[in-house]
Every structure is written in C-alpha cells, then in structure tokens.
Image (tube, rainbow, N blue to C red):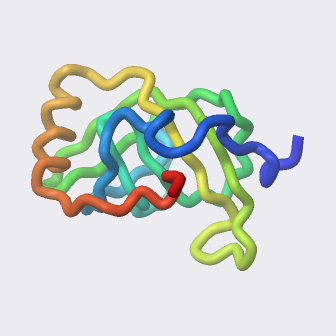
C-alpha cells in the first residue's frame, strides 16, 4: 500500500479526544542512536512527527521523547496515519502516532509540559 494513500477514515473532533499543542519536545525511536526530531504537535493521546522512514499504518514501536529540563519519557506508539510530503522538507513523511502505553510517571511529566504549551488549531476539523 502506498504511504500517501494511508489516511485516517474519520475526520476532526470524531477522532481527536485530546487537544494538540506545540511543545518543545523532541523524539527518536527508543534505544537507537538516531538524531532527535522535533515533535510537530503532541497531546495526551499521541503526536505528529516528521520521519525519514515510510512506516506502515499499524506499525508499533517505542519512542523516546525528550522534554524540557533534560527529562525523557519512553512510550509504546502505533502509526495511525502517514503522508508523503511533496518537497521532502524537513523529511519525506509526516506521521501520526498514537500512544498505546505511557508509564504513570511519564504521563505526569508529559502533562506538566502540555499544560504550559501553546494550543494549536486543528487543521483536520471540518467546517
């Protein structure tokens, strides 16, 4: 299945239970020495990131998030959508990840960051 054809079946508020924010968070696949990528937006339910890899919808993997103050959170994620970017800048793919498991401590750390972050407009909502 082509990466650009893998889009969510529902739109807007129907699929987003948590508000998204722009927060100073970076991430990379856990336990790998890859460069960190800035998280495009994040909420308690998941995050949007740019990727060099064409993940398949349904793929699961651990992600390490780097929070302000030098703290980090590792969580299990699932790819829920992926889009190929036209100009491949800043990366070839735009990826939506859903959080499947975040430890209680990690969730608390993430909540602290999200409370101080700037809300963003939901570009996927209808109307």
Residue 34: % across, % down: 51, 54
Q: Is residue 125 left or right of residue 114?
A: right
Residue 36: % across, % down: 43, 59
Q: In this view, does 116 lie to the left or right of 84?
A: left
Residue at far right of view: 1
Residue at screen point 25% across, 59% down: 119
Q: How many marks?
A: 0
- Within the image, what quadrant is residue 43 found in? top left
Kindly tell me whether residue 126 is visible in this rendering. Answer: yes
Q: In this view, does 41 lie above or below 74?
A: below
Residue at screen point 51% across, 40% down: 97
Quarter containing the N terminus: top right
Front-most of residues 10 and 22 = 10
Residue 92: % across, % down: 69, 66
Q: In this view, does 78 lie to the left or right of 102?
A: right
Residue at screen point 70% across, 67% down: 85
Kindly tell me whether residue 39 is visible in this rendering. Answer: no
Q: In this view, does 62 lie above or below 32?
A: above
Residue 105: % across, % down: 16, 26
Residue at screen point 51% across, 57% down: 127
Front-most of residues 9 and 47 = 9
């Amino acid at each position: 299945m082509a990466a650009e054809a893998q889009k969510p079946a529902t739109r807007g508020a129907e699929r987003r239970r948590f508000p998204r924010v722009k927060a100073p968070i970076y991430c990379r696949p856990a336990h790998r020495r890859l460069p960190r990528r800035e998280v495009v937006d994040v909420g308690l339910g998941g995050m949007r990131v740019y990727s060099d890899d064409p993940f398949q919808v349904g793929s699961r993997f651990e992600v390490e998030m780097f929070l302000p103050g030098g703290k980090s959170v590792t969580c299990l994620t699932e790819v829920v959508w992926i889009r190929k970017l036209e100009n491949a800048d800043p990366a070839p793919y735009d990826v939506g990840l859903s959080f499947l498991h975040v430890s209680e401590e990690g969730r608390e750390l993430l909540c602290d960051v999200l409370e101080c972050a700037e809300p963003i407009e939901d570009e996927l909502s209808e109307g």
